[in-house]
Image (cartoon, helix red, strand yellow):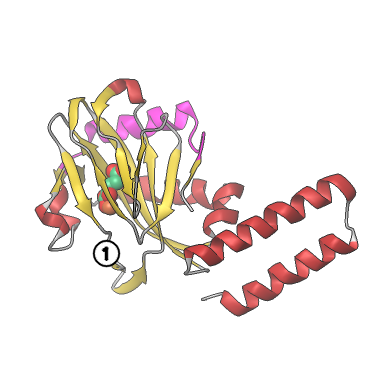
Amino acid sequence: MIFSIDNILSPEEISEIKQVLERAEFVDGKLTAGWHAKLVKNNQQLKSGTSQKELKAKICAVLFKNALFQTTVRPKTIHSILFSRYDQGMSYDTHVDNALMKNNGSFCRSDVSFTLFLNSPQDYEGGDLTIEGVQEEQHYKLDAGSAIIYPSTTLHRVNPVTQGTRLVVVGWVQSVIRDASDREILFDLETARRAIFAKSGKTPEFDLISKSIANLLRKWADI
Ligand SMILES: O=C(O)CCC(=O)C(=O)O
Ligand SMILES: [Fe+2]
């Protein structure tokens, strides 16, 4: 399931983050790519250090509080976050994200990837995130403050930026539910249960769906 969440960051939060990024040092994005992704990664990212740690903590806190992020992603840990900049001519060609990423000395699994846009689509040409399916591909370029969230299992790319600058936060989540189709079943059931509750309250049907959600979580939770 690929979905977007709008207005994760307010305009004030975006401008605070961008002010920090304007003063900060960026390094070659190849530093954090796997050996095959290095061949196609051509961007810049915020150097690790104090401001990167602070911004990362802020983004994690905002995402953990977001109700839609919780029900769709079911995050166990948001283990990796990068602040990436694509100036004119930069791109990140087709790749799959590393399945295992090192975080504080131990490995975390990437189940869900996200791109949170910091610039508006009017600020740059090209640079759409393209997610490849078996038969077709989807292109994403969202408003500043909105995020596209997709399974880390996909092949995807960032098309060349032909004008302006594309500024994004990208991140990877280990989910309590490792399989994307299982997360979708839980999301559908949760949506149905809330609709029943809004319409008719705590009915026997609501109780049955609640029981199914709880028992599927017991079966699938990877904690
Ligand atoms: O910038 C993006 O939208 C995604 C970048 C990406 O695929 C990555 O950093 O692995
Ligand atoms: Fe990627």
Residue 181 vs residue 42, the one in the foreground:
181
Q: Is residue 51 visible?
A: no
Which residues are the magenta region?
5-26
In the picture as drawn, the residue positioned furthest to the left comes out as 39
The image quadrant that residue 173 belongs to is bottom left
* Circle 1 residues within 10 Å: few <14, some 14–19, many ≥20: some
Tell me if residue 123 is in the magenta stretch.
Answer: no
Q: Amino acid at mark 1?
A: Asn
Residue 76 vs residue 161, the one in the foreground:
161
Whether residue 2 is situated above or below residue 118 in the rendered picture:
below
Q: Is residue 114 visible?
A: yes
Kind of element beneath mark 1? loop
Whether residue 94 is situated above or below residue 213 in the rendered picture:
above
Residue in the picture at 36% in, 33% down: 141
Residue in the picture at 68% in, 59% down: 189
Residue placed under numbered mark 1 in the picture: 98
Whether residue 25 is situated above or below residue 192 in the rendered picture:
above
In the picture as drawn, the residue positioned furthest to the front comes out as 135
Q: Could you tell me residue 42's position as x and y percent?
A: 13, 44
Residue in the picture at 51% in, 76% down: 222
Q: Could you tell me residue 49's position as x and y percent?
A: 25, 51
